[in-house]
Image: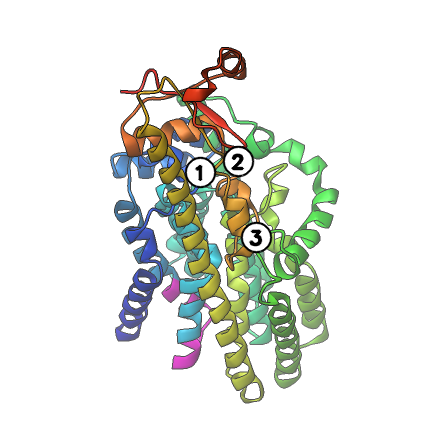
């Protein structure tokens, strides 16, 4: 009991210290800018099948600020950390600390925090995803063992379908560990898979039911309206995509920046360690041939498990916010690190990895804060001259330039700024929230008319212009 609370409290304190900029600075993504202070976009979430987020919204009065969202998120993350340590039987103080640091420093967790208006829901999905395996294997009460995992699956998917990958990956990696420890039971696997299927089907029915009750049509965003039979037809292509995505995550810059710090070298070392550790355990515990073949099959299919959400949600695009399953892999590797031959080298590799994580997370926070300052600076400059009817504001798309030279983890700018950058809604919201003014954009025809009438003398002109009408500013 003492160890449990020590892990939870230590994790919480570290989360608070490492991610303090999220509470003290203006670190915004485009989505957070549009949904800050008071998030009421739950009809959108329900259309995507995320009806659980609506319940979270009700519980917190639809308010959305970093303090309201992040402090509970840190607590939930701390509980998840303890559960993973206990589930994978992480032994020793050093291995426990390394596991805590994985959860505290990982860009995957950091990305969830950045989207703070949904962070509580996403981390509850993470928690329930882990509890699905944890309760099934740890509980001795047959009712809890059979009912609670189904409920956990439903809750997890209702927050974000991407956590299906976490549920499956946790289960598979835990079972590899059971095979190596000669505790594996085929009957338990079939039992769990039955509960998983029941949970997924029940979620799907509830998703359709909530959309019917709220009179909301399924969204076409990321193929959410094609969840079901259409995804079955694309399964062969999804197998290929899952291997491609895994390769990109660990060895390319597509999903997370790997090139700056040569992250791919660390990935190779960790994979080598995992394979050698598994082989050594096979020899040491004299695992029978049928189970060896099963382990080989599971390892070869690991990319499919890591990216299993793409088999359910058609056209989905993997990015850090959907990559929670990947965080289980280094924890699984750590569960073998009590082997004397590899202990010190592995600790060194993880220390290097944590240093990279820390630099990337903090650099990302600085970059996003700089983006906010760029918006703020250019808007304030315009407002100083709001006696002019028309303002032309210079292109503040500086984030792409910042991104080229920073050491952050962002590769997919779309989920941070690029998707909305220079678009009307983001600027209108920005000025509304931070300057308390209502603005409208001037179309290009009006702008050309101004130029023809020699109004350019009263226009602040810069390259790559954005034109805003301050005539209605309040």
Give the magenta range: 81-96
- Marks 3 and 2: in contact by CB < 8 Å? no
Q: Which mark is residue 85?
A: none
Q: Residues within 10 Å of mark 3 (few under 14, many from 20)?
A: few
Q: Nearer the viewer, residue 140 or 52?
A: 52
Q: Secondary structure at mark 3?
A: helix
Residue at 49% x, 32% y is 462
Q: Is residue 258 left or right of residue 140?
A: right
Q: Which mark is residue 404?
A: 3
Q: Is residue 470 visible?
A: yes
Residue at 74% x, 44% y is 236
Q: Nearer the viewer, mark 3 or mark 1?
A: 3
Q: Which mark is residue 30?
A: 1
Q: Is residue 103 left or right of residue 246?
A: left
Q: Residues within 10 Å of mark 2 (few under 14, many from 20)?
A: some
Residue 303 figure quarter? bottom right
* Residue 22 at x, y percent in the picture: 34, 52
- Marks 1 and 2: in contact by CB < 8 Å? yes
Badge 2 is on which residue?
A: 419
Q: Label 2 vs label 3: CA separation? A: 17 Å
The quadrant of the picture occupied by the N terminus is: bottom left
Q: Earlier in the sequence, mark 2 or mark 3?
A: 3
* Residue 408 at x, y percent in the picture: 50, 57
Residue 378 figure quarter? top left
């Amino acid at each position: 009991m003492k160890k449990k609370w020590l892990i939870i409290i230590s994790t919480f304190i570290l989360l608070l210290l490492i991610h303090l900029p999220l509470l003290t600075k203006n670190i915004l993504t485009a989505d957070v800018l549009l949904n800050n202070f008071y998030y009421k976009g739950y009809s959108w979430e329900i259309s995507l099948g995320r009806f659980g987020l609506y319940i979270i919204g009700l519980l917190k009065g639809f308010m959305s600020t970093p303090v309201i969202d992040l402090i509970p998120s840190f607590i939930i993350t701390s509980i998840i950390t303890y559960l993973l340590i206990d589930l994978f039987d992480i032994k020793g103080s050093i291995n426990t600390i390394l596991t805590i640091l994985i959860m505290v420093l990982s860009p995957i967790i950091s990305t969830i925090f950045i989207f703070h208006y949904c962070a509580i829901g996403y981390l509850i999905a993470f928690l329930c995803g882990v509890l699905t395996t944890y309760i099934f294997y740890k509980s001795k009460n047959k009712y809890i063992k059979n009912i609670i995992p189904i409920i956990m699956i439903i809750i997890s998917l209702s927050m974000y379908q991407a956590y299906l990958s976490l549920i499956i990956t946790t289960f598979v990696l835990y079972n590899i560990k059971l095979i190596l420890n000669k505790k594996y039971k085929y009957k338990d696997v079939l039992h769990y898979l039955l509960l998983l299927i029941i949970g997924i089907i029940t979620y799907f029915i509830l998703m359709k039911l909530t959309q019917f009750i709220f009179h909301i049509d399924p969204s076409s965003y990321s193929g959410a309206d094609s969840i079901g039979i259409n995804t079955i037809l694309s399964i062969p292509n999804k197998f290929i995509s899952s291997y491609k995505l895994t390769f990109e995550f660990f060895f390319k810059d597509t999903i997370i920046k790997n090139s700056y710090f040569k992250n791919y070298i660390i990935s190779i070392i960790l994979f080598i360690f995992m394979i050698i550790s598994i082989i050594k355990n096979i020899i040491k515990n004299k695992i029978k041939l049928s189970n060896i073949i099963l382990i080989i099959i599971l390892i070869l299919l690991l990319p499919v498990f890591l990216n299993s959400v793409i088999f359910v949600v058609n056209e989905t695009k993997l990015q850090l916010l959907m990559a929670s399953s990947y965080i289980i892999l280094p924890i699984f590797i750590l569960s073998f690190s009590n082997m004397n031959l590899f202990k010190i080298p592995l600790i060194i590799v993880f220390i290097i990895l944590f240093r990279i994580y820390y630099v990337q997370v903090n650099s990302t926070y600085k970059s996003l804060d700089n983006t906010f300052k760029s918006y703020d600076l250019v808007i304030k400059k315009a407002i100083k001259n709001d006696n002019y009817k028309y303002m032309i504001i210079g292109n503040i798309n500086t984030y792409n330039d910042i991104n080229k030279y920073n050491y952050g983890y962002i590769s997919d700018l779309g989920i941070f700024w690029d998707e909305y950058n220079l678009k009307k809604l983001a600027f209108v919201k920005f000025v509304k929230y931070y300057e308390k003014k209502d603005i409208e954009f001037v179309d290009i025809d009006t702008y050309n008319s101004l130029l023809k009438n020699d109004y350019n003398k009263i226009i602040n002109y810069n390259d790559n212009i954005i034109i805003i009408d301050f005539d209605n500013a309040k």
